[in-house]
Amino acid sequence: MNAASDAELVARCLAKEQDAWDELVDRYARYVYAIAARVYRLERSDAEDVFQEVFARVFERLDTLRDVDALRPWIAQTTRRCAVDALRRSGREPPIDQLPDEPDDSLARLDEAMTVHAALAGLSPDCREILDRFFTRDESYRTIGAELDLPPGTIASRIARCLARLRDVLQPDTAPRGGKKADRPRVG
Amino acid sequence: MTTPEERIAELLRALPTPPRGWIEAAKELPTARHELDTIVERIERDAQFRALVLADLEEALRGEGVEPTPAVVALLRRHLEQ
């Protein structure tokens, strides 16, 4: 599965391709949500306003983005600004020393998480689904088992197997069956 | 010591899925923009209508037959702020 680069997506969005816009939203929805809800710890209604505001700004100003490879930092910066505005509006703006712990570190961690999510594309659809359900949708073994028609007892071993495959996608030089080394980000 | 798999799991958890409705609303932005064109044009030439929109944005949208979805409201708010 070959995912379009951010630059390709931006170009297609500017050509008014709805599919490209859908893909951009899918790619960055978790990122924007994590910055609003986890880094800035906004309440749900404020997080939703920020989420919509960020995508509205991205949609309206995409043609002003000078470096199309800088889409992610631009979205991160836009989300941070909107989150701080939301905190001000709600009168909950924290003192400087109580701002999110090291927001730059938190964002760096989310950037690393985006790399891991992108690597999910290198897995089978079954593995992608089970990892997504368990780790990002927080579904229980029972729920996953019922949805995928699998005995709950096998879910843990499937998750472990899929995580090992994802590790191999991210670090192909450590894959047990060998394989071509690639210039991929390392996790660990 | 954290294993690579544990670290990967931790990073997967770092990006939770937002509510589906939020994502769908954001995907509607191109359609919403199209629907708003007429309203935006009227805001620019009709000060009374602009005041009405500023007073109650969602009600003004309903009055024009446009559903004030989060995407539409966010777009119109952006326009008014400019």
Image (spheres, rainbow, N blue to C red):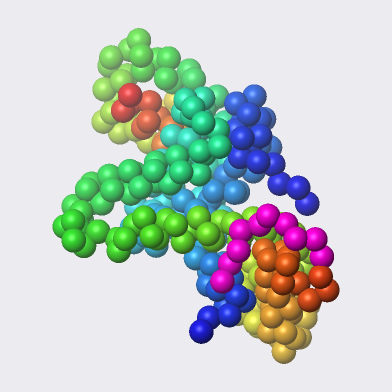
Q: Position of residue A152 (x, y in %)?
A: 71, 86
Q: Position of residue A63 (x, y in %)?
A: 51, 25
Report the side of A8 relative to A59 (left or right): right
Q: For the magenta stretch, what is the residue range?
A: A179-188
Magenta run includes residue A185: yes
Residue A99: which quarter of the image? bottom left
Q: Position of residue A11 (x, y in %)?
A: 63, 29
Q: Work out which residue is located at the far bottom of the displayed protein and give it.
A: A153
- Eyeballing the image, is A65 above or below A86? above
> Residue at the location (67% across, 70% down)?
A167
Residue A179: which quarter of the image? bottom right
Quick check: can you spot residue B81?
Answer: yes
Report the side of B59 relative to A32 (left or right): left
> Residue at the location (36% across, 14% down)?
B44
Looking at the magenta stretch, what is its main secondary structure? loop
Q: A129 or A101, which is in the foreground?
A: A101
Quick check: can you spot residue B68?
Answer: no
Q: Position of residue B14 (x, y in %)?
A: 49, 65
- Eyeballing the image, is A136 above or below A34? below
Q: B29 or B46, which is in the foreground?
A: B29
Report the side of A29 relative to A162 (left or right): left
Residue B77: which quarter of the image? top left
> Residue at the location (43% across, 46% down)?
A76
Q: Work out which residue is located at the far left of the displayed protein and give it.
A: A95
> Residue at the location (36% across, 17% down)?
B43
